[in-house]
Each structure stands twice: as structure tokens, then as C-alpha cells.
Image (cartoon, rainbow, N blue to C red):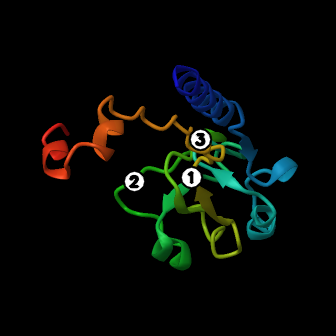
């Protein structure tokens, strides 16, 4: 019983550390980076993004920027007025929550010409759970074998 608890704790610890160790950094657009004239939906199509992964937007400073937007902002290429653009030329965004994420360039008409990215972020995956350990059957009560000889009413009083 104690051994199975230790094994469960070890399995969970290994799962947590392996999930952390497998977080990936994705350079958006690979060697092309964050630029105009690139199909970011095709780039993202064969990738799987998980919580803990990072997106890195690389571009020449002053030529582009990055805004995180919602679905409507993505569709309309509209940067939210209350947010600041990321402008470092190497903007890193950690994917902290699962769900759909949208990003656009807010420079001139770059978004309208395709400089935008939508991805789906999956939860961190855990290893399959271990089957429940089978505890031995509880030992019979010391007086249970007397039930054959003791009247039922009297026997119920001992339980």
C-alpha cells in the first residue's frame, strides 16, 4: 500500500517535470519571422501548441509590431485601443492558458494583407493515470465465523 503511494507520487512528479521540460519555443514564421507576404495559418497548421509553450515574434524594430486581440479584432484587423503594441523586434509570449489565441500586426495594412496568426492552445497533457491499486480484502471480523451458531439478532449487536 505504501509502495503504491510512493509510485503514484513518483509518476506525478515525473509527469510534471516532463511537461515543463517539453515546453517549446516557436519562432513565428520560422526563418521568415513576423513579416508581410507569409501565410501564418499554413505555418501553424502542422503545429500543436500547449500551455507553457512560447511564441517568439522576430522582426526588424520599427517595421512591424504585435497585438494580442480577440476574434473580432482578428477578423476586422483592429488593434484594441487600450493595449500597447509589442515592439521589441523579438516579442515573446508565453501561452499561459488553453484556448484560441489571435495576434495581428498593427502597422499600416499589414494585417489586412495576411500578417496575422490564430492558434489553438491545448492544456498540458498528463500521462495516463495509473490503475487503482487493489487493496487486500479487509480481514473478517474476529467474531464473524460465529454467525453460524449465534442467532442473527444477537450477532447484529456485535457489528
Give the mark, 1 or 3, whose residue is nearer the N terminus: 3
Give the mark, 1 or 2, whose residue is nearer the N terminus: 2
Q: Which residue is drawn at 62% across and 48% down?
A: 125
In-image side of 41 versus 15 (left or right): right
Camera-side residue of 99 and 60: 99
Expressed as whole percent of the image width and height from the top left, the position of residue 42 reads: 80, 69
Of marks 1 and 2, the one in the foreground: 1
Relative to residue 22, is residue 105 depicted above or below? below
**Quick one: label 2, few (<14), some, or many (20+) residues within 10 Å?**
few
Relative to residue 48, is residue 24 depicted above or below? above
Residue picked out by circle 3: 52
Camera-side residue of 86 and 11: 11
Relative to residue 133, is residue 5 depicted above or below? above
Of marks 3 and 2, the one in the foreground: 3
Give the mark, 3 or 2, whose residue is nearer the N terminus: 3
CA gap between label 1 and label 3 equals 9 Å
Give the secondary structure at mark 1.
Answer: loop
Contact between marks 3 and 2 (CB within 8 A): the answer is no
Residue picked out by circle 2: 83
**Quick one: label 1, few (<14), some, or many (20+) residues within 10 Å?**
some
In-image side of 13 versus 159 (left or right): right
**Quick one: label 3, few (<14), some, or many (20+) residues within 10 Å?**
many
Relative to residue 111, is residue 124 depicted above or below? above
Q: Residue at x 61, y 24 (%)?
A: 10
The mark found on residue 123 in the picture is 1
Amino acid at each position: 500500500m505504501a509502495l503504491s503511494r510512493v509510485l503514484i507520487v513518483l509518476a506525478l512528479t515525473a509527469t510534471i517535470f516532463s511537461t515543463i521540460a517539453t515546453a517549446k519555443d516557436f519562432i513565428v514564421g520560422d526563418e521568415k519571422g513576423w513579416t508581410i507576404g507569409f501565410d501564418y495559418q499554413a505555418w501553424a497548421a502542422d503545429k500543436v501548441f500547449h500551455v507553457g509553450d512560447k511564441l517568439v515574434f522576430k522582426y526588424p524594430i520599427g517595421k512591424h509590431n504585435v497585438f494580442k486581440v480577440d476574434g473580432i479584432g482578428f477578423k476586422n484587423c483592429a488593434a484594441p485601443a487600450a493595449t500597447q503594441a509589442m515592439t521589441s523586434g523579438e516579442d515573446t509570449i508565453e501561452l499561459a492558458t488553453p484556448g484560441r489565441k489571435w495576434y495581428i500586426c498593427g502597422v499600416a495594412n499589414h494585417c489586412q494583407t495576411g500578417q496575422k496568426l490564430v492558434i489553438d492552445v491545448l492544456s498540458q497533457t498528463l500521462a495516463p493515470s495509473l490503475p487503482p491499486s487493489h487493496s487486500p480484502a479487509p480481514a473478517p471480523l474476529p467474531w464473524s465465523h460465529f454467525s453460524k451458531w449465534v442467532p442473527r439478532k444477537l450477532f447484529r449487536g456485535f457489528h
